[in-house]
Image: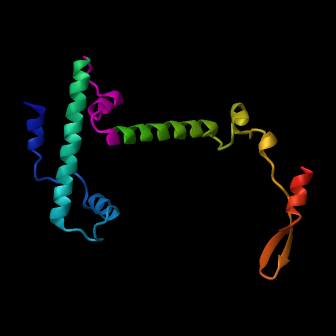
């Protein structure tokens, strides 16, 4: 049986929970309690989008003689829409950053491992750190700096 025909058997059934759809609609500007037909239509649209995206990715994988879909297949399916492709890239970069942060912490004792101590050390600032300690006087409710020019000329 054609895979798309199997999807047709589930028509009318809701694939996402009402709470998930309600939160999604509310986050995008709908009222706190959305109408049931709105939730059903959104559920159907999201389900169709995910299904079509998976079929397109499967087509890409099958052209490369693979049965499993990889992230590259999904990127290939999204190649015509730069917004989708950009979001996928953003999420994958965040995933790499999170994995790198997790490697710094030893999961067994929640302490920083000795091999990663150097990664946590701050770089010396050198000449870039020119914080000036300014003499300030309080005049009423307003603070003014005194001797600012003198301090700058001394340096």
**Figure check: 56 above or below 91:** above
Q: Nearer the viewer, residue 14 or 152?
A: 152
Magenta highlight range:
65-84
Q: Position of residue 116 (x, y in %)?
A: 69, 34
Residue at 77% of width from left, 81% of height from top? Answer: 141
Residue at 81% of width from left, 53% of height from top? Answer: 131
Q: Position of residue 19 (x, y in %)?
A: 29, 62
Q: Position of residue 102 (x, y in %)?
A: 57, 39
Question: In the displayed structure, does residue 9 sit left or right of residue 16?
Answer: left
Residue at 33% of width from left, 41% of height from top? Answer: 84
Which residue appears farthest toward the top when viewing the image? 65
Which quarter of the image is occupied by the N terminus? top left
**Figure check: 135 above or below 105:** below
Q: Position of residue 44 (x, y in %)?
A: 17, 51
Numbered disc total? 0
Picture quarter containing residue 88? top left
Residue at 23% of width from left, 37% of height from top? Answer: 53
Q: Nearer the viewer, residue 43 or 148?
A: 148
Picture quarter containing residue 80? top left
Q: Is residue 142 magenta?
A: no
**Figure check: 134 above or below 82:** below
Which residue appears farthest toward the bottom when viewing the image? 140
Question: In the displayed structure, does residue 31 sit left or right of residue 4?
Answer: right
Colour theme: rainbow
Question: In the displayed structure, does residue 74 sit left or right of residue 101?
Answer: left
């Amino acid at each position: 049986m054609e895979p798309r025909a199997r999807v047709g058997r589930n028509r009318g059934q809701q694939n996402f929970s009402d709470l998930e759809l309600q939160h999604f609609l509310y986050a995008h500007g709908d009222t706190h309690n959305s109408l049931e037909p709105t939730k059903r239509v959104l559920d159907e649209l999201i389900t169709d989008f995910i299904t079509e995206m998976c079929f397109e990715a499967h087509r890409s994988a099958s052209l490369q003689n693979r049965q499993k879909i990889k992230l590259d297949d999904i990127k290939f399916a999204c190649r015509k829409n730069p917004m989708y492709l950009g979001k996928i890239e953003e999420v994958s970069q965040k995933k790499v950053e999170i994995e790198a942060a997790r490697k710094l912490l030893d999961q067994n004792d929640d302490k920083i491992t000795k091999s990663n101590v150097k990664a946590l050390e701050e770089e010396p600032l050198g000449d870039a750190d020119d914080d000036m300690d300014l003499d300030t006087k309080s005049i009423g409710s307003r603070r003014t700096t005194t001797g600012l020019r003198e301090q700058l000329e001394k340096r």
